[in-house]
Image (cartoon, helix red, strand yellow):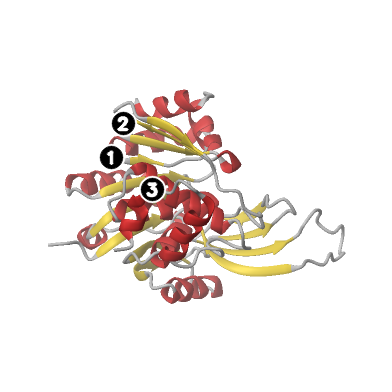
Amino acid sequence: MSPRFDYTAVGFITFDALCRPVTDIAPAGGTYFVDELTLAVSGAAGSAVIVAAKHGLRSRAVGGVGNDDMGDWVLQKLAHYGVDTTHMQRCPGFTTSSSLVTTRPDGARPALHKRGATDGFFVADSQIDDVLDTKILHVGGVGLMNRMDDSGRTEELMREAKRRGVITTLDIYASTPADLLKVERLLPHTDYFLPSEEEAQALSGLTGHRNLAQFLIDRGAACVILTLGADGAYYQHRNGTSFTQDAYKVEVVCTCGCGDCFNGGFATGLHYGLPDEDSMRLAQASSAQNATGLGSQAGVSTYQNTLEFIQRHVAHNKMHLVRALG
């Protein structure tokens, strides 16, 4: 029997308020005017699951929000995109995880973040069977999921997912060396670990793409994909396969959520059974489209539009992607 869901994202789901362009914060009680201001659901799980839903995957979000207006809006927006919210929890004593994002003219996005219900949600024993009724399980936001991580439940969930044959992907949030112990427990149950280069450097204390990836593979990951921003992405599998893929050139508006949208695009390729190199192209295209608008997933619309984006930007587009339309 096939699973009910194609993609389930567990973890960091946040309410974002974004504005641009911002070069300075007004002093004292002053006011600076901006050209754009918007709201978005973001986060290592939130952005990824919305991209997957926009690409047509049956998608589910698992995480926490507070009993507040931001939580109401997050749940409403997830449902708007067709994301199942059965296992989104209202966490007593927590506000919704929320950010103020001040987007710079070059697309950089310094942010102010209020930790919230991502630290408070928990997948209970009675929920595990339903949460794992999925083809792909993505855990996004290790480092912000205190109740899940500190109790060992994140590890138990990923271990059980692997035992059931679920494809597992993993991402972290702005890691520090102190997060390595949390991450190490998860890597043996991880098919694809997708940190940024900076996050992998923080975990390992190393430099160099091959060194960073091997450090993480040695700790159990089957495959490591490092996102490199404007320099693209680096892929290394424990079978020895490795390559670097360039980023697409776009007019950048905001880079908020680019890595998380990469994860949703990569999962789309996994769902359609594409080779990893083509899944990486979908991931890069999702990230690039995201950068063309203000707010996570702003530039991503449908799977066909993402394929057409690739076809417009890459002369040597592989036929695997065309076949996936069928």
* Secondary structure type for disc 2: loop
In the picture as drawn, the residue positioned furthest to the left comes out as 1
Q: CA distance from mark 2 to mark 1?
A: 7 Å
Give me the residue at 72% from left, 68% from top.
Answer: 36
Residue that badge 3 annotates: 318
Q: Is residue 47 left or right of residue 3?
A: right
Amino acid carrying mark 3 in the image: Lys
Q: Where's the C terminus, which quadrant?
A: bottom left
* Secondary structure type for disc 1: helix
The label on residue 220 is: 2
Amino acid carrying mark 2 in the image: Gly
Tell me residue 244's x, y (percent). 47, 34
Q: Label 2 crowding class (10 Å Cα cut-off): few <14, some 14-19, many 20+?
A: some
Give me the residue at 22% from left, 60% from top.
Answer: 133
Q: Is residue 47 left or right of residue 291?
A: left
Q: CA distance from mark 3 to mark 2?
A: 31 Å
Tell me residue 225's x, y (percent). 43, 38
Q: Earlier in the sequence, mark 3 or mark 2?
A: 2
Residue that badge 1 annotates: 189
Q: Is residue 28 left or right of residue 60?
A: right
